[in-house]
Image: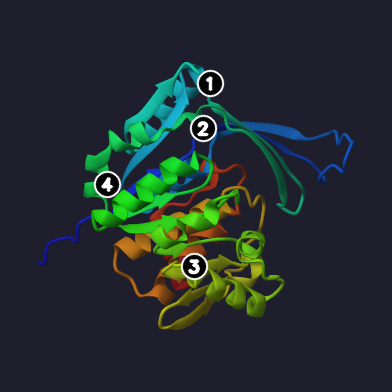
Amino acid sequence: MPPLAAAPRILVVGSANVDFTVAAARLPRAGETVSGGTLLVNHGGKGANQAVAARRLGAEVRFVACVGDDASGRGIRDALESEGIGVAGVSATREAATGTALIVVDGEGRNQIAVAPGANWRLSVEMARGRADDLAWADVVMCQLETPLETVAWVLDEARRRGAVTVLNPAPVRDGALELCRLVDYLTPNEGEAERLSGIPVSDPTGAAAAARALRERGVGTVVVTLGAAGALACAADGDVRVSAFEVDVIDTTGAGDAFNAGLAVALAEKRPLGAALRFAAATGALACTRRGAQPALPRRTEVERLLSGR
């Protein structure tokens, strides 16, 4: 009997929040109060979501982040540890409270999100440098833009130097993000982020491809633009690859992008071809839309494989 393949090793460096989500009949307009919703309180943050998603897909995962020295921060760390995620790199600070997100989700699964970053903006280069052994350990290193750009830049550069594949989810887009392009093997913007980063209108796959090519010219290895219900498109050195979205009953799209990114990272660590990696990521993202909340909705690997097989 052949030996089992080693689990992919994923290092996530990024944000961790407490999410307060209200499910309402519709999203409020400016200055309007929409009543009658229900409240769900859970853990979130793009970094923590991606770490949990990768772990549930079967990867070994370590997480580097900064939370407040408060009950919320301790709760986040305990929850991540209970998932089997390495949390030695989760620092606690007394200088800021744990990050908090306020989310409204309407009856069609669309959302509005406002974030108070708090301790996420205290994740320093020095904290990341103290986890250099994790960078050497990882097959794939994932970052987002909810932590200081100088920390993200140092992590991506050091990961590259140590031979890891780098994945950057450029969300939310911030000034200076383009300077990171030369450090990124896989850049994963959605339509709006691709448009903001490239300056090219993105309203269809043709526009997405043009934006992706422009970003590749800035030094990115492969650009993957997520297109919501239209699937995803990747622009790589050897051509473009497009995959369709999976049809699911959408309840809440919060965390779907994080699930997609985790699926892509795990598939890349498993050395899957780009088309197969995109399909695995798309299935992971689709399943995250079928339940409420961010981390509670993140699927297990068996669910993803079932969707991929059409069962």
- Give the Cα distance between marks 3 and 2: 26 Å
Label 1 Cα neighbours within 10 Å, binned few <14 / some 14-19 / many ≥20: some
Is residue 59 something one can see in this rendering?
no
- Quickly name the residue at label 1: 96
Tag shown at residue 153:
none
Determine crowd level at label 3: few under 14, some 14-19, many 20+ residues with C-alpha closer than 10 A.
Answer: some
**Picture coordinates of residue 125 (x, y %)?**
38, 36
Residue occupied by mark 2: 121
Residue type, mark 1 in image: Ala
Using the image, determine if residue 280 lies above or below residue 290.
Answer: below
Q: Are marks 3 and 1 in contact (CB under 8 Å)?
A: no
| Mark earlier in primary sequence (1, 4) | 1
Mark sitting earlier along the chain (3/2): 2
| Side (left or right) of 19 relative to 12 | right
User: What kind of residue is marked 2?
Assistant: Trp
Circle 2: element type:
helix
Looking at the image, tell me whether mark 3 or mark 4 is earlier in sequence order: 4
Q: Which residue is mark 4?
A: 135
Which numbered disc, 3 or 1, marks the residue that appears first in the sequence?
A: 1
Q: Which class describes the residues within 10 Å of circle 4: few (<14), some (14-19), or many (20+)?
A: many
What is the distance, in whole Å, between disc 3 and disc 1 at their CAs? 35 Å
Q: Secondary structure at mark 3?
A: loop
Left or right: residue 105 versus residue 99 is right
Query: At which x and y percent is residue 39?
Result: 70, 31
Judging depth in this view, the residue of 197 and 47 nearest the camera is 197
The residue under label 3 is 218
Q: Is residue 146 left or right of residue 183?
A: right
